[in-house]
Amino acid sequence: MRKSLYFLLLFLLAGFMSLAQGKPDYSKITLVIHGGAGTITRQNMTPEKEKAYREKLNEALQVGYDVLKKGGTSMDAVEATIHVMENSPLFNAGKGAVFTNEGKNELDAAVMDGKTLMAGSVASVTTIKNPITAARAVMEKSEHVMMIGSGAEQFAKVQGIELVDPSYFHTETRYEQLQKIKDKEKTQLDHDGGTSSNENIFTEGNKFGTVGCVALDAYGNLAAGTSTGGMTNKRYGRVGDAPIIGAGTYADNNTCAVSATGHGEYFIRSVVAHDIAALMEYKGYSVKKAADEVVMKKLVERGGEGGVIALDKNGNIAMPFNSAGMYRGYIKKGKAEVSIYKD
């Protein structure tokens, strides 16, 4: 009798310890992505263009969700998901990055861990194949938050992160966009919506092509990541909001995880990602109410265009944008949904 009671107590103790450590809950795992916002309308979209974007967005969702289903962390899922979009020329990140005024591809990326509030970012890198991985390395393998340019590339090399020749990022479509806008001598955000002699899937209108992902894992932890090639024809080492923690990227288990896309200068000035989290923390707003307040009211009043994806610790999702469209999608309870247009 005493022996049975002893084993029962051991069993109960093990159960209590499991609860204390946080038993995985796979029912809440959620992943949300964006691939840019802007003048994305049905008038600017052909069936071929739409099919290409929907397929790649769905692929990214499935890759990230598979990581979560197998017990991977939210940070693992964010990195794997963004790899898919960085490796696709469809988006202004990684392989599809736009050109600077000097004819270079300068890339930015950031990640943040909602459990620890640790963060990492890189900016103005030209040889790192997947900047999101470099950003994670800065967070996990250095005492810093941000590294830029050749220093970030040297760090990536030391960490064994894959480097490529800058020509890897060159795509003819993006180069044509640079030549067209240089003729106009004005700064352009990603796409100009004009008609090219080489009509293809990229000419869908004026678009901010940053990519991003937020995720909630089975352990209740949030993470956020953002990656971009910045602005077509940008000069003087311009850096936008994507690698700025609190502006384009933010995560805190107590509130939400956020990744933004839009006119970076406005997102930096408004500290958009952190402002959403702050409204939740200090005013008790839901993630939807907080995201709508910042994107649909504050940004609009200040003249900023773009959108965000946001996710709270309970798996609630917000994807507001004040532009004509935003490539976006989420996957939850095994069901994936991808959207492009405002309606």
Image (cartoon, rainbow, N blue to C red):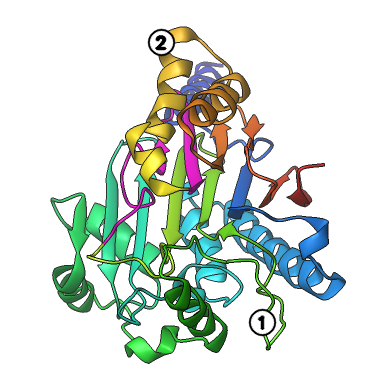
Q: Which residues are magenta?
A: 238-262
Q: Is residue 124 left or right of residue 341?
A: left
Quick one: which residue is furthest to the top in this view? 283
What mark, if any, has residue 282 been given in the picture?
2
Q: Residues within 10 Å of mark 2 (few under 14, many from 20)?
A: few
Type of the residue with mark 2: Tyr
- Indicate the quadrant containing the N terminus: top left, top right, bottom left or bottom right: top right
Q: Residue at x 68, y 88 (%)?
A: 198
Quick one: which residue is furthest to the right in this view? 47
* Image quadrant in which you'd find residue 164: bottom left
Residues at marks 2 and 1, CA–CA distance in whole angstroms:
49 Å
Q: Is residue 249 magenta?
A: yes
Name which of mark 2 and mark 1 comes first in the sequence: 1
Type of the residue with mark 1: Ser
* Image quadrant in which you'd find residue 112: top left
What mark, if any, has residue 196 been given in the picture?
1
Q: Is residue 114 left or right of residue 59?
A: left
The picture places residue 190, in percent across and down from the top left corner, at 52, 65
